[in-house]
């Protein structure tokens, strides 16, 4: 194992100079710093994590706070986690994953023990009880999601309101006049989860703006629930020809359920969704969808944290514009 003394001998400097080059605690000449860095690369030296933390007063660890509450679609959550971990490693940081529903207590415990340098917080609610603590902590944080009052916070997310609007606008542009939103499980709305509420806002606003008849249906994420909601929709809205789905596990079961009830997709019924592209593409009838940019959101959240840790100014709010991709599940309304 290469030691700091080996690097010092190779570069022709003292071990303390190598330490200063790594930590930046004392100024050294540019020529010396470059010589030390060249020796580090050539010898393959990796500073001990504890020594790095001691030298920099940092742990080189980020916390990713994802309470795995009921109604959460874990595969999509894990896409966020992979993106955060991958980007953090590029910045020589590890990630501590916090999945327990501990709220403020969990955040306080992690902050008080100096386990992490900064936090990424997910599953944001409109009236999130964690906000006062996040505003008061001496550690930077970024929220993937927007609470109702975001003052004093750094937030990033897909513009879910615009995403809901975009799905409806596409259906309206194809001539559909009666539309429905099959949304997240009921408990997601009861908690006031921000992204789900904003999809409903966008869906309703666009339907009203275009003079469409519309309804919103929270739905459990289970195949049996897909059959039940499809039957309910056709019973309550017999003229239904357009559906927006914001519930990833139901996408394929809903297509199957409507076709079992005698509606061809897209001949009789057009379907749009908000979900990852790979899911929309994998359905038997590929679904027109607004992409859920998990990789970009996770990566940019880490980049924002790195800038904050370095004392750089960052925008308070970053909203990613929705992108709709046309696939086989949408067609002009088959007017009687």
Image (cartoon, rainbow, N blue to C red):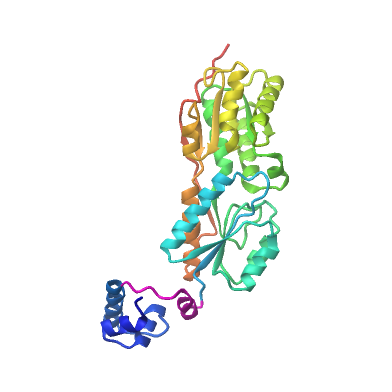
Q: Is residue 53 magenta?
A: yes
Residue 52: x %, y % from top left: 45, 76
Percent coordinates x, y for residue 151 in the rendering: 62, 60
Number of marks drawn: 0
- Of residue 22 and residue 223, the one placed in the foreground of this image is 223
Most extreme residue toward the front, as rendered?
1
Q: Is residue 10 above or below residue 235?
A: below
- Which percent across, then down, holds residue 54? 49, 80
Asked whether 34 or 334 is in front, the reply is: 34
Above or below 174: residue 29: below
In this view of the protein, which residue sits in the foreground, 311 or 265? 265
Quarter placement of the C terminus: top right
User: Does 130 sit left or right of 83 as displayed?
Assistant: right
Rendered position, 102 above or below 236: below
- For residue 116, side relative to residue 197 (left or right): left
Q: Magenta segment, which residues?
A: 44-57
Left or right: 56 as drawn, with respect to 151: left
**Image quadrant where one finds the N terminus:** bottom left
Q: Quadrant of residue 226?
A: top right
Farthest right residue in view:
190
Residue under the image location 59 percent in, 36 percent down: 249
Residue at position x 43%, y 76% in the image: 48
């Amino acid at each position: 194992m290469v030691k700091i003394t080996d690097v010092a001998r190779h570069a022709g400097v003292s071990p303390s100079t190598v330490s200063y080059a790594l930590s930046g605690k004392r100024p050294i000449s540019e020529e010396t710093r470059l010589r030390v860095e060249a020796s580090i690369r050539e010898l393959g030296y990796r500073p001990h994590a504890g020594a790095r933390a001691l030298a920099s007063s940092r742990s080189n660890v980020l916390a990713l706070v994802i309470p795995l509450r009921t109604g959460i679609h874990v595969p999509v959550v894990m896409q966020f986690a992979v993106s955060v971990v991958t980007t953090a490693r590029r910045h020589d940081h590890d990630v501590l994953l916090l999945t327990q529903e501990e709220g403020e207590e969990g955040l306080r415990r992690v902050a008080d023990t100096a386990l992490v340098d900064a936090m990424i917080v997910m599953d944001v609610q409109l009236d999130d009880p964690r906000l006062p603590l996040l505003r008061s902590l001496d550690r930077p944080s970024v929220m993937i999601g927007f609470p109702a009052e975001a003052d004093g916070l750094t937030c990033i997310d897909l513009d879910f309101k615009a995403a809901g609007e975009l799905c409806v606008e596409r259906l309206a542009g194809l001539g559909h006049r009666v539309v429905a939103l099959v949304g997240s499980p009921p408990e997601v709305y009861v908690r006031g989860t921000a992204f789900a509420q904003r999809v409903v806002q966008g869906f309703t606003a666009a339907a009203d703006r275009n003079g469409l008849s519309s309804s919103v249906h929270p739905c459990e994420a289970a195949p049996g629930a897909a059959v039940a909601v499809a039957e309910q929709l056709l019973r309550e809205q017999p003229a239904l020809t357009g559906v927006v789905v914001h519930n990833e596990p139901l996408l394929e079961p809903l297509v199957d359920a409507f076709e079992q009830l005698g509606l061809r997709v897209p001949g009789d019924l057009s379907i749009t969704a908000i979900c990852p592209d790979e899911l929309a593409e994998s359905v038997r009838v590929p679904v027109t969808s607004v992409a859920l940019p998990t990789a970009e959101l996770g990566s940019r959240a880490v980049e924002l944290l790195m800038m904050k840790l370095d004392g750089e100014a960052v925008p308070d709010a970053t909203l990613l514009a929705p992108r709709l991709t046309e696939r086989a599940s949408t067609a002009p309304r088959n007017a009687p």
